[in-house]
Image (cartoon, helix red, strand yellow):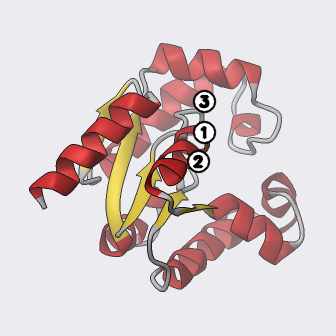
């Protein structure tokens, strides 16, 4: 079974995803890294040179390729679930886990690491980005099979293991 992590930028998908992959001895995959490798460019540059519509189509393309992988933890891009039918595809690939982090914590995390996040540059501040984008994206994240509040590795692992035991 695959585990796909969804959530807003800064929610810990990459950090927690690597730890979960190690725990289960799974492969760790970041969709943004796959796009960067395919495009031979950073996400920020893809946004700048080819636009967001192109990038969102690439995300969907990557998801379709990921239908072929097994025993992987996949960290999705923060906006990936919100476009096309991506959330349905995510749920068809494996166990979707929403790393739900409150606005205040997201702002604090993103203030430290906002340079390589193209969506932040569209707003006047990190705070404005979170307060405007998060409410738009939550309805998509809520379609995840599991929700983990104020995401930590232990909370995420516990929720995933509980779900697997029920299944």
Mark 3 or mark 2, whichever is nearer to me: 2
Kindly identify which residue carries mark 2: 18
Residue 147 against residue 101 in the figure, above or below: below
The disc, 3 or 2, on the residue closer to the chain's N-terminal end is 2
Count of marks placed on residues:
3
Residue 60: image location, x then y, percent: 54, 75
Q: Residues within 10 Å of mark 1 (few under 14, many from 20)?
A: few
Residue 89: image location, x then y, percent: 38, 74
Who's the residue at 72% across and 39% down the image? 122
Q: Quadrant of residue 154?
A: top left
Kindly identify which residue carries mark 3: 129
Q: Residues within 10 Å of mark 2 (few under 14, many from 20)?
A: many
Who's the residue at 82% across and 52% down the image? 44
Q: Is residue 4 left or right of residue 129?
A: left
Secondary structure under tag 2 reads helix
Kindly identify which residue carries mark 1: 15
Secondary structure under tag 3 reads helix
Residue 148: image location, x then y, percent: 32, 35
Mark 3 or mark 1, whichever is nearer to me: 1
- As rendered, which of 1 and 139 lies closer to the eye? 1
Secondary structure under tag 1 reads helix
Q: Given contact means CB atoms under 8 Å apart, are the residues at marks 2 and 1 in contact?
A: yes
Who's the residue at 26% across and 40% down the image? 159
User: Distance of mark 3 from mark 1, alpha carbons?
Assistant: 21 Å
User: Distance of mark 3 from mark 2, alpha carbons?
Assistant: 26 Å
The tag on residue 24 is none
Residue 28 against residue 131 in the figure, above or below: below
Residue 47: image location, x then y, percent: 78, 58
User: Distance of mark 2 from mark 1, alpha carbons?
Assistant: 6 Å
The quarter of the image holding the C terminus is bottom left
Q: Quadrant of residue 34?
A: bottom right
């Amino acid at each position: 079974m695959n585990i796909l992590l969804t959530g807003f930028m800064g929610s810990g998908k990459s950090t927690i995803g690597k730890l979960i992959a190690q725990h289960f001895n799974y492969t760790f995959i970041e969709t943004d890294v796959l796009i960067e490798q395919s495009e031979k460019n950073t996400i920020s540059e893809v946004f700048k040179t080819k636009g967001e519509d192109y990038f969102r189509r690439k995300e969907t393309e990557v998801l379709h390729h990921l239908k072929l992988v097994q025993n992987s933890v996949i960290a999705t891009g923060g906006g990936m679930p919100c476009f096309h039918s991506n959330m349905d595809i995510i749920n068809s690939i494996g166990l979707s886990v929403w790393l739900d982090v409150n606005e205040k914590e997201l702002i604090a995390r993103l203030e430290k690491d906002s340079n390589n996040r193209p969506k932040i540059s569209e707003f006047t501040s990190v705070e404005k980005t979170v307060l405007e984008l998060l409410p738009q994206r939550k309805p998509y994240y809520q379609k995840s099979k599991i929700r983990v509040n104020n995401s930590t590795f232990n909370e995420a692992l516990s929720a995933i293991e509980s779900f697997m035991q029920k299944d």
